[in-house]
Image: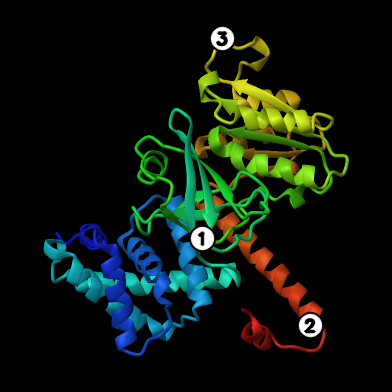
Amino acid sequence: MADLGLSLAVALASHARAADHFWSFMEDRSVRLLPHQFAAVFFSTLGQLVAGRGDSAGRRAALAVLGRMYRRFGLQPYHGTAVAAALVDTVRRFAGEGWEPELAGQWEVGCRRALRLAERAAGALGDGPHVTFGEVEACETASDGVAVLTVRPLRRLRYLPGQAMPVCTPRLPGLWRWYSPASVPRPDGRVEFHVRAVPEGVVSPVLVERVAPGELLWLGPAFDVGLSLEAAGDADLLLAGGGTGLAPLRALVEQVAASPNGRRVTLVVGVRTLLDLYDAVALDKLEQAHGDWLTVVLAFSNDRDVEPAAQGDLLSLALYHHRPGQGFYVCGSPRLIEAARNRLPAAGVAADSLHLAATFHSALDSALWVSRQRSAHAAHLGTVLEAAGDGSSLGQFRRGAP
């Protein structure tokens, strides 16, 4: 039976040459819509979506990248014929023995479907950055299975603390995963990502175990994933992070520190054992610097050697420290988020104060994320048009957009 995934995997074994062919195919037919430096990103991301590879969160990340590129490069539905022809010809040329004649039709139909999804995503996500590249400057082993990647983007990233962005290594072209910067935007532009090698995972073990300083990563645009500090107003905060879910919450603490307004913050960090606590030095520095309003609580779910007050699962200790009126933020594994969704409201946490990180592992989660992006895009659009104040049409605004 013909296998889209196999034909793509073989073609991507030479992804740089395949991307060059994909780009040249369209250029030769006067379809000049894709800058050459982004050909590998576009080709591999489109191919992975058509082949249906990756988990639901990874596919959502890939679609966000493709949608933003679709908008930035001015793609239109009528470009679908040329893009599909280029994709089919490229995979056929580079798939070798993985190619079978009946795949041509499957690739063409799948490409058109993926481009329609990209068009819809472009409308929901609106204007903004698309993809840039970053050099890995350091890859430090923080604990067993966890690495801290320090990346220097070639172009300064635009993001807010608590947001997440798609990240891809060219070692696995087109396979994207969501990661949140672990700090507020730094003056030097560097970004720190915390990555855990997920058992049976495809991308995370490569990022943790194989990626080395000097390599490039592909960095997609940042999006709100439900952890915006603005959503809590001026309320005190209770931040509960499991494992590397600590990263965006640490960035929120830094955001509060940059603009202190008298609010108090309790940061609860959940790990299995003391050996799994990978960011202890940074947490200690934060608490020492901001101990007048910041309290760091450690929760060890499977370590009987720590003091009794620190023993327990993350949500139990977070509920112990919860006070009415706090903005309650939770970030971590899909299992943790689902438990929080079910358990915290039943324990009395008000729905309007509960902020859970998006995981994209359920249809509802994805729908809420899309709705959030549409709302943000509409609000931004309204602000721009109001600022114009001169009867400027939407079409004029878009033509003037960078």
In the picture of the structure, the residue carrying the numbered disc 3 is 305
Q: Which mark is drawn over residue 398?
A: none
Q: Earlier in the sequence, mark 1 or mark 2?
A: 1
Residue 374 versus residue 21: which sits nearer the camera?
Answer: 21
Instruction: Using the rendered view, name the quadrant where residue 77 is placed.
Output: bottom left
Helix, strand or loop for disc 3: loop
Of circles 1 and 2, the one toward us is 1
Q: Earlier in the sequence, mark 1 or mark 3?
A: 1
Q: Amino acid at mark 1?
A: Gly
Q: Residue furthest right?
A: 262
In the picture of the structure, the residue carrying the numbered disc 2 is 388
What x and y, as percent, mark residue 275? Answer: 51, 21
Q: Is residue 298 above or below residue 307?
A: below
- Proximity of marks 1 and 2: CB atoms separated by less than 8 Å: no
In the picture of the structure, the residue carrying the numbered disc 1 is 220
C-alpha gap between disc 1 and disc 3: 42 Å
